[in-house]
Amino acid sequence: MKLTLSWLKDHLETDASLGEIVERLTSIGLEVEHVDDKAALKPFVIAKVLTAERHPDADKLQVLSVDTGSGAPIQVVCGAPNARAGLIGAFAAPGTYVPGIDVTLGVGKIRGVESRGMMCSERELQLSDEHTGIIDLPADAPVGTSFATYAHLDDPVIEINLTPNRPDATSIHGIARDLAASGLGKLKEKPIAAIKGEGACPVKVALDFGDTPSLCRGFALRLVRGVKNGPSPKWLQQRLLAIGLRPINALVDITNYLTFDRGRPLHVFDAAKVAGNLTVRRAKDGETVLALDQREYTLTPEMCVIADENGVESIAGIMGGEHSGSDEGTTDVLIESALWEPLNIARTGRALGIITDARYRFERGVDPEFMVPGIDLATQLVLDFCGGTPSEIELVGYAGYTAPVISFPLSEVKRLTGLDVPKAESIDILSRLGFTPKGSGEVIDVSVPSWRPDVEGKADLVEEVMRIHGVDAIAPQPLTSHGAVNTKILTTLQVRTRFAKRTLAVRGMMEAVTWSFIPAKHAEIFGGGAPALKLSNPIAAEMSDMRPSLLPGLIVAAQRNADRGFADVALFEVAAAYEGDTPDKQRRVASGVRRGTAKLDGAGRSWSGNAGPVGVFDAKADAIAVLEACGAPVDRLQIEAGAPGWYHPGRSGVIKLGPKVVLGHFGEFHPKTLEGLDVSGPLAGFEVFLDVIPESKAKATRTKPKLELSAFQAVKRDFAFVVDKTVEAGTLTRAALAADKKLITSVTVFDVFEGASLGPDKKSIAIEVAIQPVEKTLTDEDFEALAKRIIENVGKQTGGTLRA
């Protein structure tokens, strides 16, 4: 939001300096982002051409003698066709930066003749696009004085970074209201006279939305006959130029002026180009319109339009159509002032990619009570600048404004902010801001003005009191100490998230934060793509689906690193993945990928040998580490085949706890997966579902259990079993471990062998069983009995036999 200081003072009676105004704006929540004090135009002075003679070596150039008020005339070479003796214009001396041509002047020679400066055109000073000649000022212009001061171009421009919840501050009048409420002057309330028209408006308006919700809350229209459209007054053009708008013609400039001055977007139609009456309706699917930006837009039924008998004339609340735009030939003009549904305006603007000042205001919510005064004010300006005869206003659809009433306990100011604001001051602040407080007790009723749709509850009123009273008046206070905190602060998922992140970081992986939205193709590869997970209004075409897994984002991120020369990367993320659009279908997942040679013990080349590529066991180790850190019973985990289709079927696994609980997946990725994501390997990854890990049993005490060490020597025994090739090693080790859970402390596979000597479809699995006596030294008979139980248990659960 841009405004000039003089424009602000049209609405605010104040003696405050620019610095005081800027400081106060920021302190009341209207953050000033930039101030242009117009210092760039200060070097330009008013100068008079004394003589103008033809350049000796160039027919189109003249050598001027210029009086700048300093005494001695200055020689300037000029090519402007209107340069002549007696002309008074704007002069730039050597060393002056000329913004329109982005050049800092110096003393130079043009065709052999020295030139010590230049006489400037309007384009060179960024006053307009005019460049056919130099600026020609009236004869009474004071030579030697500042051109910027004379032409009122030294008006500072203030740019405010508005938050979306302040629609009232999208107008200079609203900003002035806030400053006046803060005590920095008095608001100039200028009553707007209702203009009595001559006869009814011949163009009627119909709101036609059928059985669907109306997208228009009100529509006002007025015809002004006999206007003479042309350039707007110089002061209006200068104000528009100062805030970055290009003057077009008087009718269009009036609408732009009121958009900023009062926050009331308007639109003008050339009445001669409108066929019949106007209808406000939803667009037909595939309907098109050529807009004022010379682009054709294809519309959908979710969008609102203004149409005549021939079709769409305007995209409601966003941009008018080229066909009915006003120009120098306009003699009859229709002025439109309407109220649109803010959410629909935002969606339409985003879908079409159109950003306009009108959309900026309508999607935030404009003052409904200013709809009719706005069209009256616009009409008065049209009559002042262009003449004409107005009709009466055609008004449809507006039901009036009913002010919401908020019950406001004045003690909330102290409770929520710590500010001790007297009751009378709180009421006075709200009154100065346009609210209507009623009541005398500790709880008052506050009516919300029509220009503040953002105020919905008592906390909003507290904010209003706080920002005007002064946020800087809040004294800093230390947090209250409650001594020892005995209860659990973080949730289980929060604790697991921290543990998972810390564990993976320690393992040499770098944390990444990827988008929750991914392309539809990527979602489908990883089991997603359901209609319920498609975004109705994506921020980009390639971000159309909620991610069913964190892996596609991490894999693509790893490839981006590889494309930039960092092929060996290990990335992880702990975040949400989505299996459906309900809360119970959102999962907390820890995922990671390793690429190239990014193993736990280092990556890349070395004199002692190159690191091998990452593989399934690297991903498995990462997944098990996360599960162990999060308290999963890793000694009881089961590793099985059958990982999802995006993994390589022979180099992946599923981590389970019991037959039903799936804790995660790991493995190398399927070549088709990598091809679908347009990435290259080697790549391995994992995903662990943190919200599925069972809660560990609560301990009765925080005291660690007594350390118990056996006084007897541990013993290891080896066994080799012949089993079917389909038998998993994990099944065999669990069977051996279950033979005697008191004596057997661990079972480790140390050899797997396949050969013709074992028979078809057979393999040998050799295990090492660690035995720790607890009560006595075991005898040979004890070992034989234990070995027999191991052999029997393995045979019963796997069908294996002891290898001879």
Image: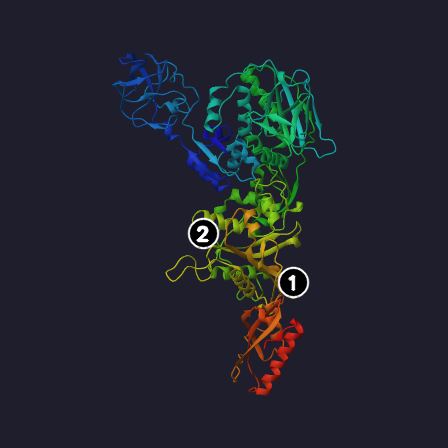
**Res. 698 visible in picture:** no
User: SS at mark 1?
Assistant: strand
Q: Where residue 83 sits: x, y (%)?
A: 35, 14
**Res. 129 visible in picture:** yes
Q: Are the residues at dot 1 and dot 2 in contact (C-beta closer than 8 Å)?
A: no
Front in this rendered view, residue 154 or 99: 99
Query: What amino acid is at disc 1?
Result: Val
Q: Is residue 534 above or below residue 279?
A: below
Q: Where residue 362 sits: x, y (%)?
A: 60, 33
User: SS at mark 2?
Assistant: loop
- Left/right placement of residue 739 relative to residue 178 reads right
* Crowdedness near tag 2: few (<14), some (14–19) or many (≥20) residues, C-alpha within 10 Å: many
Query: What amino acid is at disc 2?
Result: Ala
Which residue is depicted at the point 44% across and 21% down?
Answer: 129
Front in this rendered view, residue 164 or 179: 164
Query: Which is nearer the N-term, disc 1 or disc 2?
Result: 2
Q: Where residue 32 sits: x, y (%)?
A: 46, 38
Q: Picture quarter containing residue 125?
A: top left
Instruction: Name the residue tied to disc 2.
Output: 567
Q: CA distance from mark 1 to mark 2?
A: 35 Å
Q: Is residue 584 above or below residue 48?
A: below
Front in this rendered view, residue 368 or 604: 604
Which of discs 1 and 2 lies nearer the camera? The answer is 2
Q: Where residue 480 sits: x, y (%)?
A: 52, 60
Which residue is depicted at the point 42% across and 36% down?
Answer: 19
Q: Is residue 384 above or below residue 419?
A: above
* Crowdedness near tag 1: few (<14), some (14–19) or many (≥20) residues, C-alpha within 10 Å: few
Front in this rendered view, residue 686 or 641: 641
Instruction: Name the residue tied to disc 1.
Output: 661
